[in-house]
Every structure is written in C-alpha cells, then in structure tokens.
Amino acid sequence: MNESKNIFDERERIGFEKLSILNSIWNIDKLGQTPKYYPVDASGITKTGKTIVMENKDRTGYTLSYFEKEGTVFVEGHKWAELLVEANMEHSPLYCNYTKDGYAIVFQVDTLKSTHLDSKRVHVNSRGYEQQRNEGREFEYKFELPMQYAWIYKLDENNKVATLIRKRQSK
C-alpha cells in the first residue's frame, strides 16, 4: 500500500509540472495543486474570472501516435462523473493526458457533457490500484473520449514551454 501511495504522489507531482508547462500558453491565474484527495488535481482562475479545474493523467506508457491510431483516450467512470459535476457547477474542467513522447492531449469536458461516449468494463491491473483490488473492486468502467475533440500540445520540458499542434474539432 505504501508503494502505491508513492506512485500516486509521484504522478501528481509530474502531472503538475507538465500542467505548469501548458500554462505557458494558457496563462491561468492562481494555478495551483488542489489538496490531497480532492476530486481534481489542480485549479485556477481564467482572465475572465471563471474557475478552471484540471485532472492530470500520466500516460507515459503510450505515445501520441498510439492514441491517434486507437482514436480515443480513456477516462475512468468515477473521474468522468467528477469532471461533469464540475462542469455543471459552471466551472471549466479540463482532462489532461501526458504521453511518453512529450505531448499533452487535452479535452474540454464541458463541450462533451452531452456527447454519448462508448464505455468498457475493464479489469483493474495497475500496480497503483492494488488497494482497489484488495477492496474487491477488480473491475471498473472507462469511457472513451474521441481524439478529434482533443487539443494536442507539444511540451518542451527543457525550456518549459508548450506549442499548440492541433485544435479540437468543433462539435
């Protein structure tokens, strides 16, 4: 259990570092990590005063081309529900995924809240999910987010800047 806690802590730290690089383009005011066990990883305020919340996902086992070939990025059912609650609270939630080849795949959740998403029931097999398995939760539902609705950014971790590669397709 202690090992999985350290895995999650490290992923949170790395995710916020990458989010900070994205903020070189976004310029979100008061960007900061949320308290531990909060439903999302970070929040801030836009120039217009709107609250923006972000969920970071470390997908460093995958490349951008993998997700483009698959055509989707998955999101856990409970996480999608939390992001939809944020959207219904008039916040602007973002679901940010970081690949091993230095890309960020970002979904603007409030633009997808009325979109039908395919889902799959999958076996939980990650080292970090040992606690879930011990609690008898061996399966979970994941939704598939279509890649055409994602913003794609290239992250330059040396210079701490991001470049927009592709805008999302309008619905």
Image: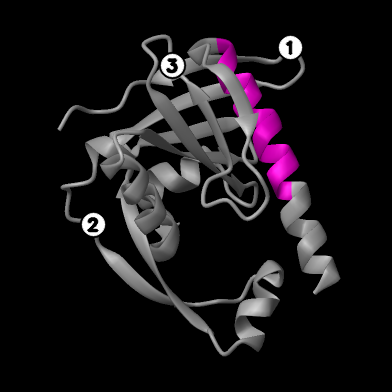
Query: For the residue labelled by badge 1, is the local secondary structure a helix, a strand or a loop?
Result: loop
Q: Is mark 2 on a helix, strand or loop?
A: loop
Checking the image for residue 46, the label placed there is 3
In this picture, is 60 found above or below 43?
below
Estimate the x, y position of residue 136 in percent, counting from the top left.
57, 90
Q: Mark 1 belongs to which amino acid?
A: Asn
Horizontal relation, residue 128 to residue 85: left or right: right
Label 3 and label 2: CA atoms lie apart by 28 Å
Left or right: 129 as drawn, with respect to 119: right
- Quarter of the image for the C terminus: give it: top left
Is residue 20 visible from the viewing direction of this image? Answer: yes
Vertical relation: 39 (above or below) 154: below
Q: What stretch is highlighted in magenta?
A: 11-24
Name the spot of residue 27 as percent of width and height, x first: 53, 11
Q: Name the residue under label 1.
A: 159
Q: Amino acid under label 2?
A: Leu
Q: Nearer the viewer, residue 4 or 41?
A: 41
Badge number at residue 117: 2
Up/down of 45 relative to 36, above or below: above
